[in-house]
Amino acid sequence: MTVAALIVAAGQGLRMGSDRRKQYLDLAGRPILAHTVEAFCAVSEVDLILLAVPAEEIDYCRNRIIRSLAGTKQIRLVPGGERRQDSVRNGLASLGADGPIVLIHDGVRPLVRPSLIVACIEGARKWGACIPALEVTDTLKKADGTGTILHTVPRGGLYAAQTPQAFQTELILQAHRRAVQEGWQATDDASLVERMGIAVHIIPGSRSNIKITLPEDLQWANMLLAFKAQD
């Protein structure tokens, strides 16, 4: 039973303020993306890894990221698109309907735990669509364009979505086909499935499964890895 992981790493990462794409920045002596791919290599249930990267950087990723992991899993590089949604669609087109489950993961979430990956796979098998998420604990405010608070948003039932988001393959293929046909745009794949009226199930996420977006996120990731090394 084939399980594929589609790791999306074609973004520019402008908020990092670096001259390199954030997925290639150093984390504990290795590129962020290498840590991410390695996490999926450690999961026996994952049979195939698709890595969506900028087309002009495929050779770079093959030599810098993939070579050190050669032999551990089948890893296939596919060209990314202008938007994240385009990159996911390209990866899914490369996969086709081969295998019942696909995991879609942000390339800059390098600290995802194998146990969470396995839980997402099991959730997709059980419910068809499954994502990890954390309950919102902060007080939320809705503001206008000037920064003036309009109202406080009740946080009950609100969750912060993470990845990997796991789906039965034909379901997520159908969602992306509908997105093209109807012009849907979304910041995550679960949103496209939701728009088809199909339920997506939440399982508990992880506080350490951070997305590296800002410089302080990279500092935090380095600290987490240092603590892990001491265990």
Image (cartoon, rainbow, N blue to C red):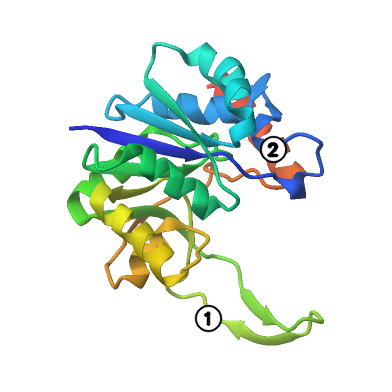
* Residue positioned most to the bottom: 150
Label 1, label 2: how many angstroms apart (C-alpha)?
34 Å
Is residue 200 shown to the viewer in this render? yes
Question: Of 26 and 207, which appears nearest the observer?
Answer: 26
Whether label 1 touches label 2, CB < 8 Å: no
Q: In this view, does 18 lie above or below 156?
A: above
How many C-alpha atoms fall within 10 Å of the one at disc 2: few (<14), some, or many (≥20)? Answer: many
Question: Residue 68 location in percent, x, y?
Answer: 53, 12
Q: Which residue is drawn at 61% across and 73% down?
A: 139
- Tag in front: 1 or 2: 2
- Foreground of the two, 125 or 47: 47
Q: Position of residue 56 (x, y in %)?
A: 64, 31
- For label 2, the residue is 22
Number of numbered callouts drawn? 2
The image quadrant that residue 30 belongs to is top right
Q: Position of residue 145 (x, y in %)?
A: 77, 81
The three-letter code of the residue at mark 2 reads: Lys
Residue furthest front in the image:
181
Q: Helix or strand or loop: what does disc 1 sit on?
A: loop
Q: What element carries label 2?
A: helix
Is residue 30 found left or right of 103 in the rendered image?
right
Residue 102 in the image, given as x and y percentages of width and height: 32, 42
Circle 1 is placed at which residue position? 154
Residue 137, above or below 72:
below
